[in-house]
Image: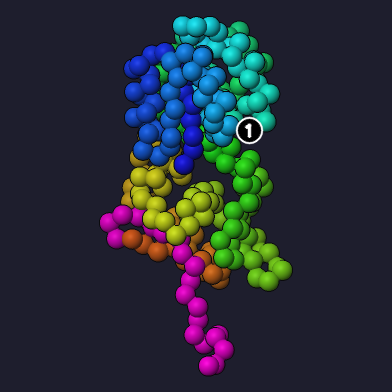
Amino acid sequence: MARVLLVEDSVDIKRMVIALLGNDHTVDWAMDLKTAGELLNSHPDYDLLLLDLGLPDGSGAEFFANNADKLDKQGTETILLTSTNTVMARINGFKMGAADFIAKPFDPLELQVRINAKLKRRQTTLNPTLRAGTVEVDLRKQQAFGIEGEARTALDLTPVEFKLLTLFLQNQGQIVDRAAILQNVWGAGVHVSTRVVDHHICGLRKKISKTSERIESVYGVGYRLEAAAADPSKQDAA
């Protein structure tokens, strides 16, 4: 779960963002720069800043510039929200160091896709390597490995299988429902049939079959990654 700071004086946009993110992430809202500064100082762990450039008590651009070092040190991703959709406005936004830029009015789906991309990038920066049992994923190199003792064997995964394995490792032991799989692997708005999802998971199961991890089906809900039960034949006799 990520922590997001929304700095925006529009109540409608605030409602939209909370509707998009509120079930999966914590969203703090500031309708002016004074409140935003207080929140930023009291919670030095924001994963993402959604910042409107035109606010009642000042310039969002100046606020961003004044807090750039702090945001950079914390690794906070930033998306600027603005009503000016010009090339120069975008260039200025990127020059300030913003990770992304979206012009109003924007489609909720586009905003969600951009937010997910930024949160994924931050997750990769914070935790470049994921491991469970004898399976490891290197997010920077986009590679997966099976581990046996000191040996690491590359797993020949397709891009979809790699995304699935990463998602399961990030949620080890928890049920990942189909909606989360579709959102994180294929993206919002892409229609993928249940049969296609099952086909890719079947392929992933085969490729990690020699590791200690197993992908279990949870009927009617989704899937869960669990460590395989110990083989009694390999245990020491009592």
Q: Find numbered disc 1 in the image and state the secondary structure of the residue it sits on.
A: loop
Q: Position of residue 187 (x, y in %)?
A: 43, 38
Q: Residue furthest bottom?
A: 238
- Could you say which is closer to the camera, residue 72 or residue 219? 72
Q: Point out the stretch of residues depicted in magenta.
A: 219-238
In the rendered image, the residue lying farthest to the left is: 220
Q: Is residue 185 left or right of residue 76?
A: left
In the rendered image, the vertical position of residue 164 relative to residue 154, given as above or below: above
Q: Is residue 213 visible?
A: yes
Numbered-mark total: 1
Residue 8: say if magenta: no
Quarter of the image where one finds residue 71: top right
Way the structure is coloured: rainbow
Answer with the quarter of the image where residue 155 lies.
bottom right
Q: Position of residue 232 (x, y in %)?
A: 49, 85
Q: Is residue 152 left or right of residue 130?
A: right
Residue at 59 percent across and 14 percent down: it is 63
Residue 17 image point, x, y percent: 39, 26
- Seen at 49% across and 26% down, the residue is 5
Question: Mark 1 — residue?
Answer: 75
Q: Is residue 80 left or right of residue 25?
A: right
Tag 1: amino acid: Gly
Q: Point out residue 124 in the picture as x, y percentages from the top left corner.
A: 60, 42
> Within the magenta stretch, is there residue 229?
yes
- At a point 55% along the width and 12% down the height, the residue shown is 60
Q: Is residue 86 visible?
A: no
